[in-house]
Amino acid sequence: MAGRIRGFIAIGRANPLDAIERSLVDTATYLLAEDLHRSDELRRAARNNRSAVLHLLLGGHAEVARSTSEILRVPIPDGPVRAALLGVPRRYALELLEAAEEDQALRRIETVIAELRPGRIGIVLPTAEGDVRTLEAILRRVPHGRGAVTDPVEVTDLPAAWRRVRGVFEAASDQPGKLYMARDVSEAGLLRHLTGPDARAWAQAALAPLTALDKGSKVDFAQTLRAFLAHNGQADASAGSLGIHRHTLRYRMTRIADALGRDLDDPTVRAELWFALQLYPDE
């Protein structure tokens, strides 16, 4: 699955296997493969269920989320919760998802975990002692992981809290292993005054060539640009935060500059693109 070895079977003996024995080995191999296939199908179904419930919660449909969770058997935490957004470069997406899904501390509580897109996962977890440390531990287990998490909020307040999380996540630096606290929107500075539909439409238009470049590509060009701008165009620091060689970074930045038709050495252009990325965090 995704180029990873899911299982293996080894048969060894001094003498060659006869026809019946080879048939038995083939049958055993087939049964093991079928078992893995069924496990993968169940895992995909469970992920789809959690994704449906998470999107309902973050969209402000708490009552519908609760009734849906009972049908899909996806437990929703009671009482105050935190919402977290964790991210990695796209090539480490599966590692991040599995690190969160398999975390023993999160498995012991009613936590909703789902992939939002490759390299981004959303988590709604109950407020408890050590909850933030658990999220920090997950980030340390994956390459170039970073995230943002809210203060405790009621489930009905999740949509507003989630907007804060996304804003903080996109505006924060790419420091690996760092988990930022998404507090009141008044701490967001200038960006809190640029949240209208016109500003978002401008950002979407400015980044449209980058969106087109990202589609169908294994390279996360948007994340590359974000890292480049966050490190003030310093090649070594930007490449290091992405886990790539500086020559690879230069190649990507050339592709980005050509797609955008902008001079990325121009400070004004950099500032505009940085604001656009903050205003349009889906990119």
Image: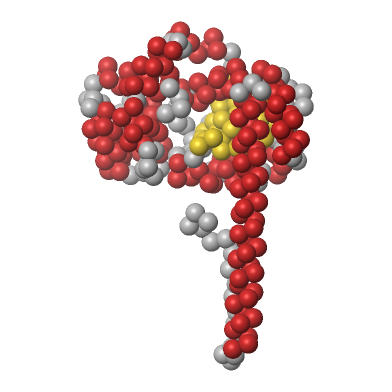
Q: Position of residue 138 (x, y in %)?
A: 60, 40
Q: Residue at x 72, y 24 (%)?
A: 63
Q: Position of residue 12 (x, y in %)?
A: 59, 82
**Measured along the vertical axis of the image, is residue 218 above or below residue 170?**
below
- The answer to which image quadrant residue 6 occupies is bottom right
Q: Which residue does the image show at 31% across and 29% down from the upper left?
A: 209
Q: Say which of 161 and 130 sits in front.
A: 161
- Residue 263 makes an appearance in the image: yes
Task: Please indicate, yes or no, whether residue 135 appears anywhere in the rendered image.
Answer: no
Q: How is the image coloured?
A: secondary structure
Give residue 152's position: percent from left, percent from top. Answer: 69, 21
Indicate left or right for 89 with 254 as reference.
Answer: right
Task: Identify which residue, 164 or 245, lies in the foreground.
Answer: 164
Q: Nearer the viewer, residue 281 or 88?
A: 281
x, y percent for residue 277:
40, 23
* Quadrant of res 75: top right
